[in-house]
Image (cartoon, rainbow, N blue to C red):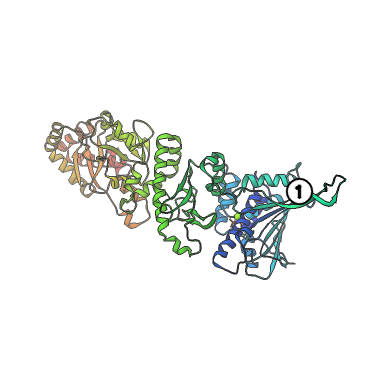
Amino acid sequence: MAKKQFKTESKRILDLMINSIYTHPEIFLREIISNASDAIDKLCYQSLTDDKVDMQRSDFKIKLGVSEEDRIISVSDNGIGMTKEDLENNLGIIAKSGSLKFKNEMEKSGEASDLDIIGQFGVGFYSAFMVSDRVTVITKAYGSDTAYKWESSGTDGYTIEEWHRDSVGTDVIMHIKDDVEESEYTRFLNEMSIGQLVKKYSDFIRWPIVMDAVEAEEVETGALDEDGNPITKQVTKVVEQVINSMVPIWQRSKDEVTKEESDEFYQNIYYDYEPPVSTIRVNAEGQVAYKAMIFIPGRAPTNFFSDQFEPGLQLYCNGVMIMERCKDVIPDCFRFVRGVVDSPDFPLNISRETLQHGRQLKIISNNLEKKIKNELRRLMDEEPENYEKFYDAFSAQLKYALVANQGEKKELLTDLLMFYSSKEKELVPLREYKEKMPEEQKLIYYVCTDSIARAESLPQAEQIRDKGYEILYMTEDVDDFVIRRLEEYEGIKFCNITNDDLGLETDEEKSEIEKKQEENKELLDFIKDTLGDSVVDVRISRKLKSHPVYLTSEGDISIEMEKYFSVMKNEMAQSIKAKRVLELNSEHHAFKSIKEAFENDKEKAAKLSKILLAQGILIAGLPLEDAAEYAELVCELF
Ligand code: ADP
Ligand code: MG
């Protein structure tokens, strides 16, 4: 029979598997069992709407077989089975788009364990080749009369031929490799090891996983002994034993489930190599009865901030999965959570379409929103380290969610925010900032910046720090938008330290600045005229102390926003510019020089004006339009 070749990518991944890059070959069983369980889920789901599926829930099972003599481990299910096309598509090529990413991930993953990668990219079936030198799949699809046998010894391709199988379902028969090192693969070839692997990785599989066991039994022979008692003899018989506990973890009471069990469940199901930072259990009665187990991850999946990420929880109705990812059951702002919702009230046999728009989902979503919020607040107060881990991974998500939809979730999300504090040198919640404010402080000071170091060196920061006030350094792109959305926190307005008015001066100080402004009006007008459209105003600064010059903005668009938009490859975005204002420190000797030049040498004064503007632009972290001209001007000073 002609061998078909695996697609190139598949071949490479098979190579990786076979050449035992993985340190956990034992997960092969989990993967094959979970495919069997998925296949049963599919047929069971079908049976809810299709009378022709002649199966009861209790008929479904996964049967394991092991023979040390033949070096075989087999996994059989009575699930949906595969057609010839399915075999080609599912076992002949590695899961579609996942494969490229898989490769990339492999290349850069020093630390990611094998567990994540195998499951995450839908290459679970191939893990059989870590322990097998040949894999045979015999399968008959639901609704089909023909069974098929698929077989492969690894990278050299596979064969498919018609075969015989009585009923619908699939057998995966793994021919276990010979040992290279002592007991390397032989260790899997006994009932005890298989049982342990099932306990470890597949205990919560909803369908019974059974294995034949030999049981001894006393039976009466029919004869009687001399005292008239029945004579018995020992016979052995083979019985199917269920080796998994089946009860899904979320159905067990909270006290019964240890943290280890629950973490392991999360890590196995969601392919995370770290435990979650928190697990929420809900057992709700009332409008909708449901149980939920919600995990808050401490790490964002690599695709979290892309369209490829699919948020949502798994929906179950009394232990039967009815939807893999239901996103309507959690609020979008908390799209990072993982977990399960199980409700006997979910309408099992109506279309998923209807379910998606169900009132029940809305009620659950609202309820979970509160629970998640409360848990995050609790973490923030009681487990700051865990909260920071979470925040590190998902702060941007919280912020985008806060800005989105006209700030609809503002109330919910504000007190989950933290920003870097100039005083504490770490992230602090807004509440803490407010609590520590000196009595006379009227505003919450912040600055948007690309780095903490730059924020520290900002000229305006000096005056505020001198007052003993804390400044929040905001280093994420979205921060500026967040603050604009918030406007204030518990009645205290936010103030960007690059603003003109920092609300620091007394009336006296203010009138003094105005006086200076008046005194230097001619000079300031001259500078403004020289600089033309590059600035909308030139002023005496109210906040500079040791620096000569600073660039601020007037109106809605800040310098930071301009920077944010300028890097986008979009004409519209690039045309968004701040209205620049040049502020000068009248106490600085640079100011004295330009004043002198203005009186004696207008040409020099014009050049100095340009230099000051260029310096302002540079300090603000913006690009100079004409760097050559600036360099020339500076050199002329020598
Ligand atoms: P995944 O399970 O992530 O889709 P796998 O590599 O584990 O990836 O399996 C590939 C596909 O092969 C499955 O999606 C399924 O369609 C099919 N498959 C594997 N095992 C079985 C089985 N026992 N019964 C039916 N289909 C199966
Ligand atoms: Mg799988």
Q: SS for tag 1?
A: strand
Residue 615 in sight in this render? yes
Report x, y in % for residue 96.
Answer: 56, 59
All told, the count of numbered labels is: 1
Report x, y in % for residue 579.
Answer: 24, 48
Question: In the rendered structure, which amino acid carries the disc numbered 1?
Answer: Glu
Position of 468 with respect to 180 (left or right) is: left
Say few, some or many: other residues with alpha carbon within 10 Å of mark 1 (under 14 / 14 to 19 / 20 or more).
few
Report x, y in % for residue 348.
Answer: 50, 61
Q: Nearer the viewer, residue 515 or 281?
A: 281
Name the image quarter holding the C terminus: top left
Q: Nearer the viewer, residue 35 or 53?
A: 53
Residue 103 in sight in this render? no
| The furthest residue to the bottom | 145
Position of 489 with respect to 350 (left or right) is: left
**Would you identify the image quadrant in which residue 633 lies?**
top left
| The furthest residue to the right | 226
Name the image quarter holding the N terminus: bottom right
| The furthest residue to the front | 227
Q: Ligand 2 is located in which of the four quadrants?
A: bottom right
Q: Nearer the viewer, residue 452 or 299?
A: 299
**Would you identify the image quadrant in which residue 98 lies?**
bottom right
Residue at x 40% of width, y 49% of height: 367
Residue at x 66% of width, y 46% of height: 197
Report x, y in % for residue 540.
Answer: 18, 37
The residue singled out by tag 1 in the image is 215
Is the residue indicated by label 1 positioned so its CB lies within 8 Å of ligand 1? no
Q: Nearer the viewer, residue 142 or 157?
A: 142
